[in-house]
Image (tube, grey):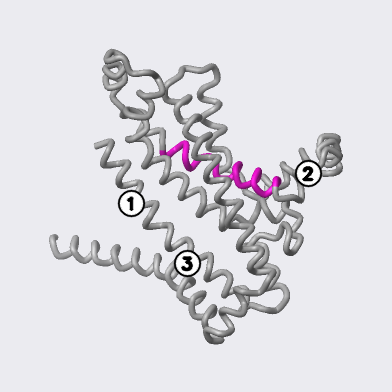
């Protein structure tokens, strides 16, 4: 009986390792090999192409803005959901998770449908010099939409486990609300906020679906790195596409342990 259980366990472990290897590790290995197959010079040439540099830089700074904004707004939303019994709280919680439930392409289409030049609102914004669709503002708005849940869901469990007695003690000792927030509430919440922000940045850098619809894909202006990669593939340059993809992969691999360490720190504070 014991031998059969051990044999079944070994079979399951082998199957799991094989599945993950085939689904994740193998494609990543192929990407790495293809990205450097033509040598370091070709790799550096591909990623230093002006269009590639502009696309990577656009993806980086718009992702950074999305991460910073969602760090603040996501924390406020989490605070509202946990600490305040607001009307429609369940609906608000469901709306927070909505970006995870719909294709990101739909998000881009929605933004174009709301703020595109074919709409009255879009024409008003264009006349005011503030276009949203097919602009950098639209890129940031789309990233804010698709990454909304990350900070909220990272901060919520921390807020739920904070001891209200510590806040009451702080107020009893004469601390102001701001001082209580800075000394009592912020330290345990900050690692979770940072972890959610890192996840937001990593997700934003790799976002494709919504940006393909909302950015306009104008080289050197609104063309982000993932859409640039698709364009290189369609133009018959898979080597260049793989090289730029490798840059995004390295960013993701670098951010993953940072996010994991912050998440562990937030969990240790809760414990």
The N terminus - image quarter = bottom left
Q: Name the residue that disc number 3 marks.
A: 250
Q: Position of residue 181 (x, y in %)?
A: 38, 26
Residue for point 66% across, 51% down:
210
Q: What's the magenta region?
A: 137-154
Cα–Cα gap, marks 2 and 1: 39 Å
Residue located 83% across and 42% down the image = 126
Residue at the image point whose x is 38% and y is 54% from the top? 258
Q: Which residue is mark 1?
A: 261
Picture coordinates of residue 221, whole percent (x, y): 73, 59
Q: Secondary structure at mark 1?
A: helix
Q: Which quadrant is the C terminus positioned in?
A: top left
Viewer-nearest residue: 181 or 148: 181
The answer to which image quadrant residue 44 occupies is bottom right
Would you place residue 266 above or below residue 12 in this image?
Answer: above
Q: Is residue 90 above or below residue 120?
A: above
């Amino acid at each position: 009986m014991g031998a059969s259980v051990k044999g079944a366990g070994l079979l399951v472990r082998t199957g799991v390792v094989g599945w993950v290897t085939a689904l994740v590790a193998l494609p990543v290995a192929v990407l790495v090999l293809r990205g450097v197959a033509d040598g370091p010079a070709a790799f550096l040439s591909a990623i230093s192409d002006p269009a590639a540099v502009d696309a990577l830089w656009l993806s980086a700074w718009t992702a950074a803005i999305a991460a910073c904004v969602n760090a603040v707004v996501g924390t406020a939303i989490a605070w509202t959901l946990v600490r305040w019994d607001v009307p429609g709280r369940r609906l608000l919680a469901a709306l927070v998770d909505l970006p995870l439930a719909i294709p990101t392409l739909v998000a881009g289409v929605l933004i174009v449908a709301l703020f595109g030049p074919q709409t009255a609102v879009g024409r008003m914004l264009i006349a005011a010099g503030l276009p949203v669709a097919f602009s950098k503002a639209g890129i940031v708005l789309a990233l804010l939409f698709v990454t909304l849940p990350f900070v909220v869901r990272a901060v919520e469990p921390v807020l739920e486990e904070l001891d209200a007695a510590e806040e009451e003690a702080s107020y009893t000792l004469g601390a102001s609300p701001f001082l209580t927030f800075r000394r009592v509430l912020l330290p345990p919440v900050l690692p979770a906020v940072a972890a959610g922000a890192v996840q937001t940045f990593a997700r934003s850098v790799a976002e494709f679906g919504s940006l393909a619809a909302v950015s306009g894909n104008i080289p050197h202006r609104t063309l982000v790195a993932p859409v640039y990669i698709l364009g290189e593939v369609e133009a018959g340059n898979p080597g260049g596409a793989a090289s730029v993809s490798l840059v995004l992969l390295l960013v993701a691999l670098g951010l993953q342990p940072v996010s994991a360490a912050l998440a562990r720190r937030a969990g240790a504070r809760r414990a």
